[in-house]
Image (spheres, grey):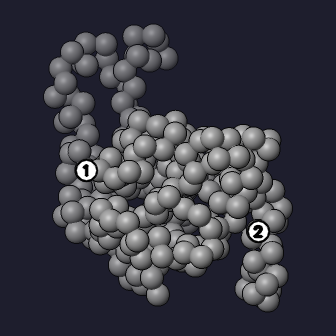
Amino acid sequence: MTDKYRKHIFFWENPDKTLIFAFLLPDNCMAFPPVSELIESFFGLIYPNICVCCSRTLLRGEHYLCAHCMYDLPVTGFYRYADNPVEQIFWGRVRVERAVAHYFFRKGNRIQTLVHQMKYHGQKEIGELLGKEIGKALRKSPLADVDMVLPVPLHPDKLRKRGYNQSEWIARGICAEIHKPLNVTSLIRRSSAGTQTKKKRYERWENVEKGFGLSHPDALAGKYVLLVDDVLTTGATLEACIHAVQRSADTKVGIAALAWASD
Ligand SMILES: [Zn+2]
């Protein structure tokens, strides 16, 4: 390959990354932007990028979701008010400044589809995309005043298997919108949670509780941290994280979950 050609490799890939085409374009081709657009349009006709929810062909500027599905996602609006149902989950259990879940997670709804794609089909960028939507909402709430953003760490075994932590991708999207640093080193996941289903309730609680720790005892002293999770159900995992985080002196905690599975 000559340097002349190497400069202008044109990539096209479909959403699930199974097909990738590469073009070598001559040096003078990129002087005409319509050339790259034409090639993109040509392959878009053969293998269109489609919406993961409704399978419509995505338009230029749309990623993973079409605009119709994006604007129709079931938003909770919890960021607008204190004492919302997600905050109530933690009442009497652990001290939380503010807590939100941005979407409703229900069987068969679009959020369930998106979470499934994000966790089990490698489409981690969906986390960042929806994280940005959460971040835009948080800018209008007191949670925008946190010092840093901490995703709930994935167990090392799961991380090895999946290759990424979906909560970290959600957190990246939030950070991009509220302009706060991402912290993935202070809160750590340390022991195997094992198979939860066969354990008794107390054993499950104990297991989750022992699963989190800090990289050093005062890692988060005096900070206001935003914990980010994907789907919030009983709040047990977040509660265990908060106990770990609050081992640092004067640490305040806020919560932002992508979605709330209310039933
Ligand atoms: Zn759609």
Residue drawn at the location 46% of the way across and 12% of the way down:
2
Residue drawn at the location 70% of the way across and 61% of the way down:
243
User: Which residue lies under the disc numbered 2?
Assistant: 209
Residue 58: image quadrant is: bottom left
User: Which residue lies under the disc numbered 1?
Assistant: 62
Residue 73 falls left or right of residue 126: left
Report x, y in % for residue 15.
39, 54
Closest to the observer, 249 or 84: 249
Residue 160 falls left or right of residue 24: right
Residue drawn at the location 49% of the way across and 17% of the way down:
1
Residue 166 falls left or right of residue 62: right
Q: Are marks 1 and 2 in contact (CB under 8 Å)?
A: no
- Gap between marks 1 and 2, in whole Å? 41 Å
Amino acid, disc 2 = Glu
Q: Is the CB of mark 1 within 8 Å of ligand 1?
A: no
Closest to the observer, 84 or 138: 84
Closest to the observer, 88 or 176: 88
Q: Secondary structure at mark 2?
A: helix
